[in-house]
Every structure is written in structure tokens, then in C-alpha cells.
Amino acid sequence: WLQTFLKRFEGVIAVSAETAAGCIARGVPEAKVSTVLNACDTKWRDEKDPEFTSWLQTEHGVDCDTHFVIMSAGRPVPRKGFSWFATKVMPELPDNVVYVVVGPVSGAPAAMRFLQKFLPSALLQSLSHAVGAQSDYIRLRDASDRPNLKGRVVIAGPMTREPLNQMYLHSSVFVMPN
């Protein structure tokens, strides 16, 4: 049904080459797909707010003074690699390294987690795409609950502009594992 729906549009604007390729793979004619990359916002501040570190510690248990903070931002979808990074890389890093993922958290994960028990992985993935659920959120949440990663993989959820800006400024490094 998705292919039929997408073909009805006069055009599709994708925000990355990967998204454009995904549209084409799902049957949208290449001539109808345009790519417009996300823009850079130059109005963000570059001064660290010292009160943000207190907030981050209180809300998420992350101490910028004692932790090496690795940050990722975006929707938790498999192609971005957040859960891969959490499960494959974080266990190999020293205990003072914390991985903070900032981004939307879908209301669907509880239902998807329930369905995960019964559905084959490929079907769960297709269903996640169809309903717009961030399917990697389930794996990321599971990783954050593992005893060896508890408190080291932090799902911060969505942030408004200024806290997000501060998160970038207070992080030791930003990674996009994909």
C-alpha cells in the first residue's frame, strides 16, 4: 500500500541520499525524487551554560566533569546505528564513557515490544516502518537496561532547541554510527 500511496505524489523531497534511495527502492520513480539536505542553523549559541550540567546530572545521571560523553541525535531507526553502537561499542569502552541519545521517542514502543515476542524480525521491521514506529528504540531501550550498560547508555528523549544546543556543547564527541 505504501508504494501505491507514494506513487500518487507529484514528487518526494528526501532529506538525505539514503532516504531518497529508500523512496526509489519502494517504487517512486527517480525523476520524482529530490534531495534537500537538512540546513545548518547559525543562530545557535556557542557558550556553555554551567547550569545545564546540573540539569543533565539530575535528569539523566550524566556528570560532564567525570564522564566522557558521547552523543548521538535523531530518530532511533536501525540505519542510524544507535543500538548497534550501544551494544557493540559501548561494552568495549571504559566505564567513565557515557552514550547519550537525544531524539524523539515514539508512543509505539510498548506495543512493538509486545509484538517483538511473537513476530519474526523482518515482519516486525516492516510493521515498524508502516506505522512510523522508531524500531531501533526497542533495541536501544533493551541495551540501556543491560547490567553492564546501566547508566552508561542514556536515552534522553527529545530536547528543545536550547537544551539540544547545550547537549552538543557539553558532549565530548558527537557520533552518527551509520
Image (cartoon, grey):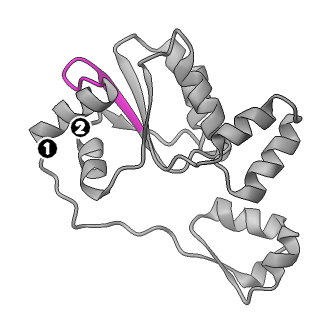
Q: Judge left or right: residue 110 versus residue 5.
A: left
Q: Judge left or right: residue 52 versus residue 178.
A: left
Query: CA–CA distance between discs 1 and 2?
Result: 7 Å
Main secondary structure along the magenta-highlighted residues: loop
Which residue corresponds to mark 2? 170
Instruction: Assess whether residue 63 is covered by the magenta stretch.
Output: yes
Q: Quadrant of residue 18?
A: bottom right
Q: Judge left or right: residue 152 versus residue 1.
A: left
Query: Which structural element holds mark 2?
Result: helix
| In contact (CB < 8 Å): disc 1 and disc 2 | yes
Instruction: Assess whether residue 120 is covered by the magenta stretch.
Output: no
Residue range in magenta is 62-71
Residue 94 disc label: none
User: In the image, residue 126 lies at what x, y percent?
Assistant: 82, 50
User: In the image, residue 132 lies at what x, y percent?
Assistant: 68, 57
Q: Amino acid at mark 1?
A: Lys
User: In the image, residue 168 lies at what x, y percent?
Assistant: 30, 44
Q: Quadrant of the N terminus?
A: bottom right
Residue 48 disc label: 1
Q: Tell which of 114 and 174 is nearer to you.
A: 114
